[in-house]
Every structure is written in structure tokens, then in C-alpha cells.
Amino acid sequence: MIKFFKISFYVIFFFSSSLVVGKTPKEWMEQAFYVGYEGNVEESIQIYTKSIEIYPNEEILYLGRGTAKQGKGDLDDAIKDFTKAIELNSNFANAYFARGKAKKAKGDTDGAKADIALANEINTRVDYVLERLNKQILADPTNPELYWDRAKHKEIRDNKSGSIKDLDKYFELVGQPSLHAYLTRGGIKEEIGDISGAMSDYNTMIEQYPSVYGYKRRARLKKDIGDLEGVKADELEAEKLIHEKTITTIQNFHDEVKKLEANPSEYNIRRQVYFLKRIASNQIDIEDYAEAVISLTKAIEINHATPVAENLFEKRAKAKKALGDMESYETDMEESRWVNRREKLQLLNQILEFNPQDVNALVERATIWIYVKEYSKALEDSDRAIKIDSSSIEALKVRAKAKKKLGDSKGSRADRSLIWQIQNNQ
């Protein structure tokens, strides 16, 4: 989590300005960052993606999305985003750093070294930028953005005390610092050991901008100084805000469902199921399992026989299990295995009635039996397929699996040995 903050701190620093009316790229960045820090990485990525649709040439947004993807372990897609950021701005040092770290995580040591070397080369130009900013501040000493810009470049050059001095001036001139400004100055104060100064910034930030992220940051600092009661208090406040936010989200999704119900169409039905599923997920997050069961039941009634229904049954089963309804839990888990397979099974039955020697149909039916845990039937169908075609690798695979599930480990190994022999003779 700390690593995510550090990367995002630099990411927001390098935001490029935009003249487009509406939410700026920096504001999109901050929204996505805080959502991601609260643990909603997928939602964070969605916010970045939406912002990129609006600002397709803002390299900072690709770096932000890549950082989020890297955080969830999606290194290939992360590298693609970092590369796009570099394509848009070939002097974007932090994109090279980020791509280098991702390449290193993938085992591409040479590629990582090359990217980090380029990033270091670009950072040598920071001194030139600092000289330019010094001149600009002399000419325009009441411009807060110049002090903010110089503070970030001093931080890059590891001049933390100088960075704080410029941030102090920025605070003095700007009048109403943002949540991000308090976090930035507080974070640097933490790094240089000014705990009381950092705590003061976090206290003021929470008074002006109460947020989950703010409470978690302060709780972390309190933990470092051994204030465990303070940690508990801040974590409790964070949980309250999460609960309030979740309730609001659920209500907003309910409103969307009502709108969709008023305009029925195939597309809107799919959207209803999507929102009902999201409602249930949020209800489960706040342990309102009874309401989650109601939401999922409605989603299943709307969209019973589709691929998504399998997940709906499984999700409802887990909610019922949390309520202690084990009988319904087992029923829903069984239903989740059968969704979208009954019709296919009927079709395979018809095919085999017409042609009992159809090996492919027997193997497919055996595979369904495996999935729905009817292992004896799977064994019977795979046996029939192998009697018809003893070299059918797929039939042997299914039979080996069925035998293993039935406790016949020796028979399963024998089938796998046959598979190996057939493959080597081909």
C-alpha cells in the first residue's frame, strides 16, 4: 500500500495541464488514486480508463493506470500503458522507472537496466528545470504553482527540506490547500522524521477533508509512534466512512436499476443484472447478507439461463452460507454447476441416441458429468468412448480424472501413462 502511494505521488507531480473544460486529468488522477488506495483496484483502473477516453493524449493517465495494473500483478498490460506514456512524452522519467520495475518483476533484467538508465539520464535535466523555476519565481514571487512545481523537482533531487520550504510558501499563497497538498507535505515530513509536523498536516487535512485515505494515513503514522488507541479510533472512523460510502453506492445502483426497469430492452436487462450484482457485492462487504440474497435472487430471475447466472448462484450460495442456511447453500452451489449445461446435455443425449458411436459427444458428456460431480457417469461415458477409439487422448484424460475423483489413483496413473505413450508414438 505504501508503495502504491509513493508511485502515485510522483505520478500526480508530473501531471500536464489541460484547457479542456470539466474534470482535469489531475482531478481524475486523484480520484483514481484514492479509490485504489482504499483497495478498489478494479474501480481505480476503470476510472483511469474513462479519463483516458476523455484525455487520450495525457501520458500521466497511462502511467497511473499502468501503476494500478502493476499493483494487481498484471505486468504485461502495465508495461503497455507505461510504453504508451513514453510514446506520448519521451522525457517522462517516471514512466521509464515504472516500466523498468515491471520488466524487472518479469525477469527482463537487461530491459529493466536500460529503462532505469534512461530515467536517470532524464533526471539529470531536473537541475536545468530548477534554474528556470528560480528565475520565474524571482519574476513572479506570488504565484503558488511555481513553488509547487519547484517543490516537486526538489523532492526528485532528494532536497526534502527545500521541498518543504517551497510547499510552506505554496500553502501560504494558495489559501485553501487540497487534500493532496496536505498528504504531500505530510509525507515528506514523515520521511525526514518530523513526526509532529506530519501529524499536524494530517490532523488539519482530516478536519477539512475527512476521507478513508486520510484516516488510514494518520492511523499508519500513529502506529509508528505506538499510539495504538489512536490507531483503533482512526480505523473505526475509516470503517464508518466506508460503510456510509457503501450505503450511498447501493442506493445509487438501486436508482439505476429503477431507470432500466422503466425502459426494458435486452441491453437494459443485462445492465440490470450488472447493477444488481454490484449491489449484492456491496451488501456482502457490509455483511448485509439477507439483502444480498434478495438482490441476487432478483438478478437470477431476470437472467436465469446465461453465462453470468453461474456466478450469481455461487455468490448467492456464499451469502446463504454466511446466514447459516447450509441446505440452500448446497442447492445453489449445485445449480451453479448446472447452469448452461442442461441444454447442452440434452443436445448430446439426442446426438448419442442417433449415433451411439460418436466419440466426441461421449467425451463432451463425460466432461459435463465431471463438472457437475457425477463421476461414475463420467467414467461410464469415457469408457464407452475408449472402447470405440482406444487412442482418444481426450477420452483418456476425462477417464483419468474420473478415476482419480472416485479414489482409483492407480487407474488414473495408468490412463495418464497411456496418454504419454500415444503422444510419443504420434
Image (spheres, rainbow, N blue to C red):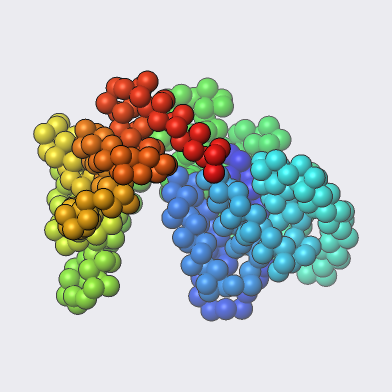
Question: Quadrant location of the C terminus?
Answer: top right
Question: Image point 17% across, 71% down: which residue?
Answer: 261
Q: How many marks?
A: 0
Left-right relation of 168 to 267: right
Where is residue 342 drawn, in percent x and y?
A: 18, 53
Where is residue 317 drawn, in percent x and y?
A: 20, 41
Where is residue 53 drawn, in percent x and y?
A: 52, 72
Most foreground residue, 188 or 287: 287
Above or below, comparing residue 346 to residue 388 in the picture: below
Most foreground residue, 79 or 228: 79
Where is residue 257 drawn, in percent x and y?
A: 22, 66
Question: Image point 37% across, 27% down: which residue?
Answer: 412
- Residue 246 in view: no
Above or below, comparing residue 232 to residue 54 in the picture: above
Left-right relation of 2 to 156: left
Left-right relation of 211 to 425: left
Question: Quadrant location of the N terminus?
Answer: top right
Q: Based on the displayed image, in which of its 4 quarters is residue 77 positioned?
A: bottom right
Question: Image point 31% across, 49% down: which residue?
Answer: 359
Question: Image point 27% across, 72% down: which residue?
Answer: 267
Most foreground residue, 48 or 336: 336
Q: Based on the displayed image, in which of its 4 quarters is residue 319 positioned?
A: top left
- Residue 402 in view: yes
Above or below, comparing residue 322 to residue 261 in the picture: above
